[in-house]
Amino acid sequence: MSASPPDRQASVGDAHLLSESEVEKVHEEMVHGYEDVEDEFEDAVEGEEAAKPDAAGNFEVTQEELSIIRAELACEFPEDYNYLSDAYILSVASKPYSKDPTVRRPLDYTLEKLTHVMQWRAEAGAPEMEELLDLANGPETAPEAVEEPEKLTKAKAMATALNSGSVYWHGLTKDGKPILWIRCNRKPWYPDVDAEVNALILLADAGIRSMPKDCTDFVCLSDSTSPPPPNPTFMINMLKALVRGYPDRLNMLCSAPVGSIIQFVMNLLLPLMPGRLASKVVLLGTEEMKEKLEDMLHGGKDDIPTFMGGTADHDQYYPIEGSCPNRGEGCLKFDYHGMVERLEAAVREFEANGGAKKEEEE
């Protein structure tokens, strides 16, 4: 799939910002029947003046309470409950309660919130995404491919979205958070929205599974040079997935440079975002981004990629689609398994060297 038509410069074109009624409609779609999601929008407002129980603003959660939550989730979602790490469950359970920020979230509320995450995963088909990847990477004569042609079509579409190499995990921050890189100039002008969202679900889960032991969130770094024309449907669906399926997972999103398309995207999405999520989006100029990366990346200046003015060559691992060989007998070209192996190796090295504690001591 070509990232963009040749010799054309993307523009906002016919895309338009949402009206107040359209914003309300999308908001309702995101939060309908999910009190905990609605509270994500309220927490940022009420939490501003809230008394903090400790320096991080978190309350204690006992081992017994963790066991109760684990048992409930295991009962309702026996095949997928291990997706949620103890560290993430504790992170969610320890937060102040939006209706009274001086106390911890009630256990029932935490369980409801985590249950909604797991229900969203089931509805979105998240646990089956790696199975789709394997199907796309295999021969079309495989029994499952022959017996379920619609599933094969879905799998091939997701593989095509991955093949652009526009999104991938690579490296860690100084405190051990995995980094999801976005290269906007590789994004398709006319995306298959469902396939793009499925690819993001697959990637998000891969990064979350590979996190260091006590890590619960990740950082997203976007090279916003030459982005494609904005596609509101894709962006809104992506935001819905982030809010419903990955609450409290995004630590920070940094994007540079800031052109007219990125400004339009932010103006479109900010009214739809929970305040706490909106506060995690940082738009920077090119030089500001380089300074930010040097401070943030585990290897400092040496980890800044070439496409952001550094020396680290990501393209040796994630080249453009035309330079990628097929990984199997199917249509997958993106080195998904190599990406996971490299991320896991980076995490092992980070933990073996004492992780963030050693960084702080130095």
Image (cartoon, rainbow, N blue to C red):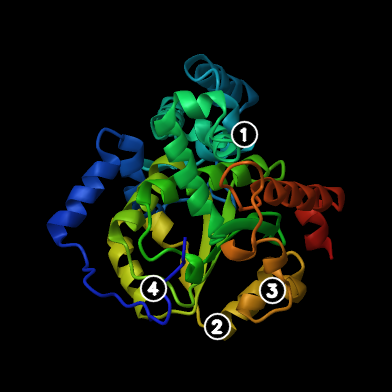
Residue at image location 48% in from the left, 35% down from the top: 126
Q: Amino acid at mark 2?
A: Thr
Q: Nearer the viewer, residue 122 or 231?
A: 231
Residue at image location 42% in from the left, 71% down from the top: 4
List the residue tagged with mark 4.
Answer: 262
Query: Callout 3 environment at 10 Å: few (<14), some (14 to 19), or many (20+)?
Result: many
Numbered-mark total: 4
Residue at image location 79% in from the left, 49% down from the top: 345
List the residue tagged with mark 1.
Answer: 85
Judged from this view, the residue extending furthest toward the left is: 21
* Cα separation between marks 4 and 2: 14 Å
Of labels 3 and 4, earlier in sequence is 4
Q: Does residue 92 sit above or below 280 in this rendering?
A: above
Query: Callout 2 environment at 10 Å: few (<14), some (14 to 19), or many (20+)?
Result: some
Residue 200 horizontal/vertical position (percent): 49, 49
List the residue tagged with mark 3.
Answer: 304
Residue at image location 72% in from the left, 66% down from the top: 316
Of labels 4 and 2, earlier in sequence is 4
* Cα separation between marks 3 and 4: 22 Å
